[in-house]
Amino acid sequence: MTSLSLWQRACLRVLERSLNSGCSRPRHFTTSFRRDASKPLAMEQYGSELLRNFSIIAHIDHGKSTLADRLLELTGTIQKKSSGKNEQVLDKLKVERERGITVKAQTASMIYNFNGRDHMLNLIDTPGHVDFAWEVSRSLAACQGALLLVDASQGVQAQTISVFHNAKERGLTIIPVLNKIDLPAAQPERITAQMQSTFGIDPEDIIRISAKSGKGVDSILEAIVTRIPPPSGSLAAPLKAFLFDSLYDRYRGVISYELLGDKVASCHTRKKYEVTEVGIMHPEEVPTDSLRAGHVGYIACNMKESSEAHIGDTIHRVGEPVEPLPGFQPAKAMVFAGVFPVDSSDFPKLEESIKRLTLTDRSVTVQRESSSALGQGCRLGFLGTLHMDVFRQRLEDEYDANIIITAPTVPYKLIYRDNKEVFVSNPTEFPETSDTASRVKEIQEPIVKASIIVPEEYFGDMMDLCFSHRAEDLDHRYLDSGTATSARIILTCTIPLSEIVTNFFDQLKSRSSGFASFDYEDAGYKQSDLAKMSFLLNAKPVDALAIIVHRSAQDKIAREWVKKLHKVIPRQLFEVPIQAAIGRKVLARETLSAMRADVTAGLYGGHYERKMKHLENQKEGKRRMKKMGTVDLPQEAFFDILSNKKG
Ligand SMILES: Nc1nc2c(ncn2[C@@H]2O[C@H](COP(=O)(O)OP(=O)(O)OP(=O)(O)O)[C@@H](O)[C@H]2O)c(=O)[nH]1
C-alpha cells in the first residue's frame, strides 16, 4: 500500500489578485452547476465585472450561517432541505455543529442571474465570537463588500460595533441587514433607529429579512450585485494570488485533473511548487480550468510542511516576479497553555496532530515544552479561551488525542535592569520574587479595552464585575437615545487580559441573565504587581501547576487552589502537605492525611508490644517514604484541577 504521506498535499486558499479560496473535508451536495463532472468548470465566462466578493459580518448568533444557507439555496447552489432541519452547510467542523458557532471562515461560490447575466458571488462566512476577530479581518481582506447583519430582537451588540469598524476601515461597501424580523420580540423600528444613530446608516438602505423563513433574502442578492463593486484586476497582468487560508488534507487520493501543471512560487519563502489542481469552493471543492483575476478559489500543490503556508503571502508564477500584495496583521496569540499527552509515549503522535491542525488554524502558535510532572508537551498560543477550547476539542474529535491542558496564561513583559525586554508566557519561566527584586526592573501585563453592552437594569452588576476584575477608566453612555424602555448602556473600561481569560465571560453572562455582550481590543501593556505562585506537594513544587497572580488576590487564590488540590489528590501512604507559596512564603496549606493500612491485621492475639512494634515500623517506613517520596499526581488529578479551574 502506498504510504499515507504520498497522498498528503497542502491546499491553499487564495485570492487571485484579491482572490481567495478555501478547502474543507468533502461532503456531498447536489449542485446547480449542471456540468459534465469529467470536465472542469470553465471560468473564463466570469470576467471580473461579473464577480462579487463579499462577507457576512455580525455579532455571534445573529444569523450569519443561516443567511448563508438561504443564499446558497436561493441561488440553487445547494438543495433546500425538505426536513426543515436548520443544519448549517458552512459550519463544517464537528465542534461548530455541536456548539452552534462558526469557528473557521468558509467560502462558497454561487451563480446568480441578474439582468439576464450570470454573476459569480463569492461568499466568505466569518466567525462571530470575539476570539476569532482575526479570522474576520482575514476574510474581509478578500472582499469588496459586507452584509452587516443585526438581530431585530437584540439590536446592535458589542461585536456588531467592532466588525462594522473593521469593515469600514478596509473601505468595504456595507449593506445593512435587519434579521429575525419574524420573531415576536423583534423591534425593527427601534433597531433601525439604533443602527442609524450608532453607525450613521440611512434607514432606507436597511434590508429587512428573516433568514430562517427566507423572507426578504432575495433582495439581498440584488443588493450584492448592484451595491458592491466588482474586484479590480487585469487579465493581462502576471499572476498574483493572495494566500488567504490553508488546509492540510490528509484524506485526499489521486487528483484526476492535471490542470495547470504550472509552477508557482511564494513571495514570502521563495519556495516553488507545482500546482496540481485549482478550483472554487462551491461550497465543496469544485475543480476549474483556471483561476482568473478576482476569482476566489483554491490551489492544491505539493507543499510538504504546514509552516510553508504563510497567510497573507502572495503567490506568483515562476519566472514572473511580482510586488507582494499587502498582507495583514499576523494573528497575535493572547492566551497560552501547555498541552501534554495523557500517556507520555503518545507525544510524537500528539505533536504531529497539532502540526496538522495548525495548518487549518494558522492563528495557533506552537513551541515544544517539557514538564517534570507531565513530560514532553507543546506550549500553544491561542487568540482567546474559546479558541483554546475549540482547538482542544478539534484535537480530540479529529485526531483522537487524549490530552491535558494547563491553566491559561497571558504573555507578560519583563523589563530587566539593563532595559532588555522579555516576554514570558509560561509560569515556569517567570522569575522568582528574589530575582524580581535584583534583576527585573518592572513587570508589565497586557491590558485590553473592553466594551460591554447591557440593558440598564444590569448596569450595577456589570460595574461590580468590572471592579472585581481590576478594571480601570470606567466610562459609559446610553446606546439608545431617548426614552426607549429598558435602554441599553455601553460600558467601556480597561482591564487586564489575565482577568478575562478565566471566568469573566461566564460571569458576565450569568450576572446579566445572558443579555450582556462583550468585546475587547488590545490596549498594550501596563506595569503590574505580579508574582509567581507555586504549588508544593510534600514540599516539592509541581511545575505544571504554577500560575501568575496579582498580589491583591494572592491569598484568596492560594486558599482556593490548595482546597481544590486537596479534593482531587488521592491519599498516599504518608501524610502530604499541600502548600501554595510565593517565593519562600507559604500562603495557604492543607494536609492530606495518610492512608493507614492495618499492619496488625494479620496478627492473632499476641503481645501488645508486638502490635506496637509493627505500628512503629510502619510509622518509620512512612517517615522514610515521606522524606524521599514524591507524590504521584495522577493525570486525572491534573485534569480535574485544570478543568475545574473555572468553577
Ligand atoms: N427566528 C429566527 N431565528 C433565526 C433567524 N436567523 C437565524 N436564526 C436562529 O438564530 C440562531 C443563530 O443563527 P446562526 O446562523 O447560527 O448564527 P451565526 O451568526 O452564524 O452564529 P455564529 O456563527 O456562532 O457567529 C440559530 O438558532 C438560528 O436558527 C431568523 O431570521 N429568525
Image (tube, helix red, strand yellow):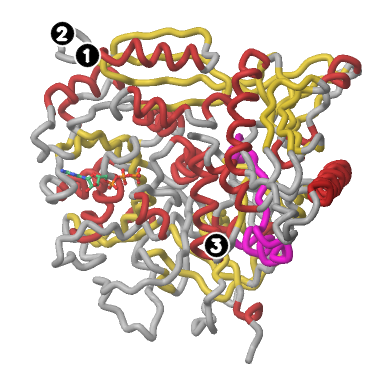
Rate crowding at label 1 as few (under 14), some (14 to 19) or many (20 or more) other CA atoms within 10 Å: some
Secondary structure, mark 2, is loop
- In the image, the segment drawn in magenta is 327-356
> Which one is in front in this view, the residue at disc 3 or the one at disc 2?
2
In this view of the protein, which residue sits in the foreground, 199 or 471?
471
Q: Position of residue 613 (x, y in %)?
A: 85, 48
Q: Are marks 2 and 1 in contact (CB under 8 Å)?
A: yes
Q: Residue at x 76, y 34 (%)?
A: 536
Q: Residue type at mark 2: give it.
A: Thr
Question: Where's residue 241, x and y in %?
Answer: 55, 56
Extreme-bottom residue of the structure: 1
Q: Are marks 3 and 2 in contact (CB under 8 Å)?
A: no
User: Where, by quadrant of the figure, is residue 6 drawn?
Assistant: bottom right
Answer whether residue 339 is magenta in the image: yes
* Left or right: 69, with 546 as reference point: left
How many labels, in total? 3
Residue marked by disc 3? 247
Tell me which residue sits at (23%, 27%) in the image.
Answer: 155
Element type where label 1 sits in the image? loop
Quarter containing ligand 1? top left
- Which residue is denoted by mark 1 in the rendering? 487
Element marked by disc 3: strand
